[in-house]
Image: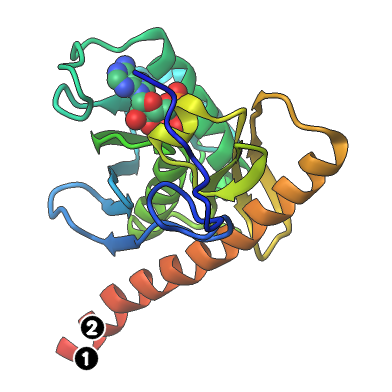
């Protein structure tokens, strides 16, 4: 594929967004009725579903901890989520991302409340268009909240990047593929805590500082939408009751 122009003459991105603009974001909490909690998160073409079971006892007692719950996490891309059919088997990338996402969630979960239990987080990427790990963190944290798991804050994720020399918010697949750098970030905004930060590519120190600020501004916007999605579910239930 030939390298496309990522920043147009008018300064906008290939999809018409401003550099500091998120893709259209849709967040729905409680989309499944069997799992303890669930959420569907869409950042533009990226669609990620998360479901949580637990806290609950599991047969594998040797995995459990005496003072807190353990969190297990599986990130998986569905076969039809990519341009070419993806093998349904877990790839090395998916195993690594499962760990990265679990570590992004652990600091906010008050796991001491449920010793000797497991909380299972299942993430399915339904459609991949860049930023699936960050959308996955947002979806998983909302699914945990929906399951009633006590948390210090929500964690939300968004990736920033550098394309044609310009720092951009919420990188899509094309920008990820052809940009100079991409930096997924997850943060718990009320705690002022960054729980995930990766950088693929090269940024100067100044660019890194600006990119992090841009990511945190984007995370705040997604945080507001996430809280709205939780309110949408739980306020409605209360009115219906
Ligand atoms: P992230 O999804 O968090 O940005 P990557 O940087 O690894 O993670 O991937 C960037 C994008 O490349 C993904 O969002 C997806 O659109 C695409 N992609 C990743 N893995 C595959 C794959 N196995 N097959 C096809 N496309 C993929």
Residue picked out by circle 1: 239
Is residue 73 among the parts visible in the rendering? no
Q: Is residue 78 above or below residue 153?
A: above
Compared to residue 89, the image places residue 21 above or below, namely below
State the SS at label 1: helix
**Circle 1: is it few (<14), some (14-19), or many (20+) Cα within 10 Å?**
few
Label 1 and label 2: CA atoms lie apart by 5 Å
Residue 141 bears which disc, if any? none
Give the residue at x 61% y 42%.
Answer: 185
Q: Position of residue 164 (x, y in %)?
A: 60, 37
Quarter placement of the C terminus: bottom left
Mark 1 touches mark 2? (CB < 8 Å): yes
> Ligand 1 falls in which quarter?
top left
Q: Is residue 63 left or right of residue 185?
A: left
Q: Residue at x 83, y 33 (%)?
A: 204
Q: In the image, is 32 to the left or to the right of 43? A: left
| Residue 138 appears in the rendering | yes
Q: In the rendered view, would you say 132 is above or below 217?
A: above
Q: Residue 73 or 23: which is nearer the viewer?
A: 23
Q: Residue at x 40, y 33 (%)?
A: 174
Read off the residue under disc 2.
236
Q: Residues within 10 Å of mark 2 (few under 14, many from 20)?
A: few
Residue under the point 42% across and 14% down: 93
Of 203 and 133, nearer the camera is 203
Q: Residue furthest right?
A: 205
């Amino acid at each position: 594929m030939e390298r496309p122009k990522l920043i147009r003459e008018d300064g906008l991105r290939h999809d018409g967004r401003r550099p500091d603009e998120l893709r259209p974001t849709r967040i729905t909490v409680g989309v499944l009725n069997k799992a303890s909690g669930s959420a569907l998160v869409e950042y533009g073409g990226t669609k990620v579903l998360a479901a949580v079971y637990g806290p609950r006892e599991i047969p594998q007692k040797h995995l459990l901890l005496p003072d807190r719950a353990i969190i297990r996490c599986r990130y998986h891309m569905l076969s039809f989520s990519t341009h070419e059919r993806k093998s349904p088997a877990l790839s090395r990338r998916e195993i690594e991302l499962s760990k990265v996402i679990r570590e992004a969630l652990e600091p906010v979960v008050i796991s001491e409340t449920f010793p000797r239990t497991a909380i299972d987080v299942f993430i399915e990427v339904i459609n991949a268009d860049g930023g699936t790990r960050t959308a996955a963190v947002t979806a998983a944290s909302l699914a945990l909240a929906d399951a009633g798991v006590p948390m210090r804050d929500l964690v939300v994720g968004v990736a920033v990047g550098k394309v044609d020399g310009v720092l951009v918010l919420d990188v899509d697949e094309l920008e990820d593929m052809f940009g100079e750098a991409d930096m997924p970030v997850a943060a718990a905004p009320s705690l002022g805590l960054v729980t995930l930060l990766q950088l693929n590519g090269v940024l100067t120190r100044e660019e890194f500082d600006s990119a992090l600020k841009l990511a945190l501004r984007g995370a705040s916007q997604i945080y507001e939408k996430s809280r709205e999605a939780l309110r949408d579910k739980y306020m409605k239930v209360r009115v219906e009751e």
